[in-house]
Every structure is written in structure tokens, then in C-alpha cells.
Amino acid sequence: MLKFISSLLRREQEYSAVGKKLLQLAFPIIGSYLLHMTYNLTDMIWVGYLGSGAVAAVGSAGFFLQLGWAMASIVTVGANIKIAHSVGAENMNAAGRYSTAGLWGIGSIAILFTSIFLAIPEQFIGFFQMKDVHVNEMAVSYLIISAFGIIISFANLLFISIFNAHGKTKISFKASIIGTLLNIVLDPLLIFVFKMGVEGAAIATIIGRGSSLAYFCFVYKKFDTIYFRGLLPNATKLKDLFRVGLPAAIQRISFSVIYIFLARIIAEWGPNAIAVQKIGVQIESITFMIVGGIMQAVTIMVGHSYGAKNLTEVPNIYRAGWRISLTVGAVTTLIFLLLPQTLFSIFVPEAESILMGKDYLMILAASQLFMCLEMISAGVFNGLGKTKIPATVSVIFTSLRLPGAYILGFYTFLGLNGVWWSITGSSILKGIVLYFLLRTYLKNNTFGKF
């Protein structure tokens, strides 16, 4: 009995030490994510004062911008994981070559998307078939202006991946602070003082992200261990980035495409419904951003352990991440259930939109804990370089949202709420399935006791 108790205490101490290290890595990432959310919420709040039509315009253009960011994750996710493996193995030369390969890869993708968005912006916005001509015009203008900032946004994402993979998460946080504060100041000035409307919001975002990138470039010169190795990309390293990052990119791209088609379904209930979905996603990102930071910390720690061949530490990292995220998920679930109308009234004044938003948050509350379970499990798989597993689970079950939304929305009494239930139901399934897949994987491989 004493031996058993001693073993439990020792294991608890191990969890505590791992949890402390995890939080040290996670807090700056969480801060960066929350600042990114503040970016979006600031835009939504100020744009919201222009009316639901303006929110719908920014939201519809935002779907295609998110598609570009999803494509960029081919490089950013691959760079984060492979550089973390190199750092864990103390092979800084390899880390530098992965950084250079990432720079070339992200630049190519940025040029591609910028060219496409500038060439045919009307065709993208026309997909939603919104009946309001003014809303369409605002959306096209927002997409065109935002396209000029794609290279800045993508470069920021790459620097975040590089610095985080080296464990320098505080640098990414500081860069986010600079960009967000500038954006918060510029938003009301450009939107209302200079009367630029949604175009002002797009310009403010570009300037804010440009300041973040400038900070990264300034700080980069001060680190001897973080550098770009070589002028041209190593073909093998670039292939490694794409091999590891492609599944995650397919997951994010499919998610963006699915949400574009989902938005097309939602558009049948009018611009208010589109605005509600856009705002609701931003509010739900309270959970997503916090747990996403923990997930990234899990990925980095697992990546370092994998590179150092210290595999028995992986289950401890998973447990520590799940305990922390469980607390976050429980709190946000209660907030969504108790304060849905209050949260939505911050962003839009229309009573109809607020009531729609209330239903959205109360339904999505049912999936928050399962979303946490999915993300932490995915973080472990990603850290091990097994990105195909969480990507496959996500693509399969997220795809079910489309037929689910169509059937529940148009052929049941639920109406628009049926669309929200298709989203929350798929999240619950993803969390359960991915948990059991991870449990099986760790038990069948040399990772110690799960």
C-alpha cells in the first residue's frame, strides 16, 4: 500500500512539473491567440456599429481570407513541428534549414493567393448570392484591400511558428501586443473619423500586422540560436515541411471550404444569420484560443520530447494538457449558457440578431468540453509528426456538418437552430473518436503507461 501511495505521489509530482512547464509555454501563446481574437473582435465591434450588413460583408470576405490562411498552414504547421523536432535533437543546423524552406514556401503561397483575390474578387463574393447590392460592394472592397496584406499576414504566421518551435513563445506574444494595440487605435479612426467604413477596418489590420512583422525582424537579429540557414531552400527539408504540414492544411482548408458552403446555407435566413454566425465564431473562439494555446504548447513539448527520444514523457504531457483545458472548457460552457444575450448585445444592436445569437451560443455550449478533448489529443499527434490522424478525423466529421445542416435546417422544425446543432454534434463526435484513437496509439507504442 505504501509503495502504491508513493507511486501516486511521485506521478502527481511529475504531472505538476510537466503542467508548470506546459503553462510557461502556453501562457504567451494563449496571450497571442487572445490578442488575435481581440483583433477580430475589435473589427467586429466597430464594424457592427455600421450595421449587420457591414458585418455580413466583412464576414463573407473573411471566409476566403481564412481559406488562404489555411493553405499557409502547409508551411507553418510543418515548420513548427520539424523545427521542434530539430531543437529537441539539438540539431540547430537542421532547424535553420527548415526555417529557410518555410520562408520560400510561405512566400510562394502568399503570392498565389494575392494574385487570385485581386484578379476575381467579385466571383468570390458572388458565391454567397447576397441580395443586398451594397453589402456585396463592401465585401468586394474589403477582400481587395485585405489581399494586399496577405504577404504580411503569412510572414507573421511563419515567424510565430519558428519562434514558438524554439520555445520563445514570449516573443510571439510581444509581437501580437504591438500589432493589436495599433489596430485598436486605428480601427475607430479609419472607420469613423476618416469615414472609410469597412475599408478602414481592412487597412487598420494590415498596418497592425505590419508592425508585428517589423518587431519580429528586429528581434530576430538578437538570437544566435534562431536563424535562416542558406539562401535557397533545401529540397529535402521543403518536402518534409509539406509532408508533415499537408494533412493539417487539408484539415484547415476543408474546414474553411465547409464553412463557406455552410455560410451559403445560413444565407437562406438572411444577412442577420450570416452576421450571427460570424460573431458567434468570434465569441466561441474564447475557448478555442485558450485551449489552442495549450494545444500548441503540448505540440511543442511533445515535439521536443520526440526529437530527444524521451517518449515516456508524452503521456504526462497529454494528461497535464487535458487537465488544464478541462477547466477552461467548463468555465466557457457556463458562460455560454448563462450570458448568451449579454455577449451578443456587445456586437450588434438588432434584437433579432441577439435572439439568434442566444440560440447559437446555448447550442454550442454542449460541445465545448469535447472540442477541448479533440484539440489536446490533436496536439499530441501533431507533436509526434502524426498529423494525418487528427486531420482525417476532422475532415470526416466536419464534412458531416453540411448534410446535417441541410437536413436539420430545411426538413425539421429546428430551422436555423438545426444548422447550429449540426456544428455542435460533429464537435462532440470528433472529441470522442480522437481521444480513443490517441489512447490506442499510445498503448500500442513505446510511450509508457497511459
Image (spheres, rainbow, N blue to C red):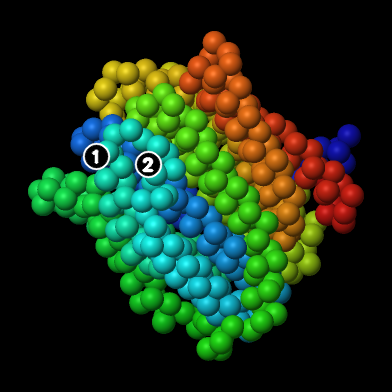
Question: Residue 55 at what x, y percent from top left?
Answer: 31, 38
Q: CA distance from mark 2 to mark 1?
A: 14 Å
Compared across the picture, whether 74 is left or right of 35 comes to right
Mark toward the start of the polypeptide (2 vs 1): 2
- In the displayed orientation, state which residue is furthest to the left: 193
Q: Quadrant of the N terminus?
A: top right
What amino acid type is highlighted by mark number 1? His
**Looking at this view, is 25 or 356 the one in front?**
356
Label 2, on which residue?
Answer: 59
Q: Residue at x 35, y 77 (%)?
A: 218
The answer to which quarter of the image holds residue 144 is bottom left
- In the displayed orientation, state which residue is furthest to the top: 413
- Neighbourhood count class around disc 1 (C-alpha, 10 Å): few under 14, some 14–19, many 20 upward: few
Label 1, on which residue?
Answer: 134
Q: Quadrant of the C terminus?
A: top right
Mark whose residue sits in front, 2 or 1? 1
Q: Residue at x 47, y 35 (%)?
A: 263
Q: For numbered disc 1, what is the local secondary structure?
A: helix
Q: Residue at x 29, y 18 (%)?
A: 351
Question: Residue 224 at what x, y percent from top left?
Answer: 50, 83
Q: Residue at x 21, y 35 (%)?
A: 49
Question: Residue 240 at what x, y percent from top left?
Answer: 69, 72
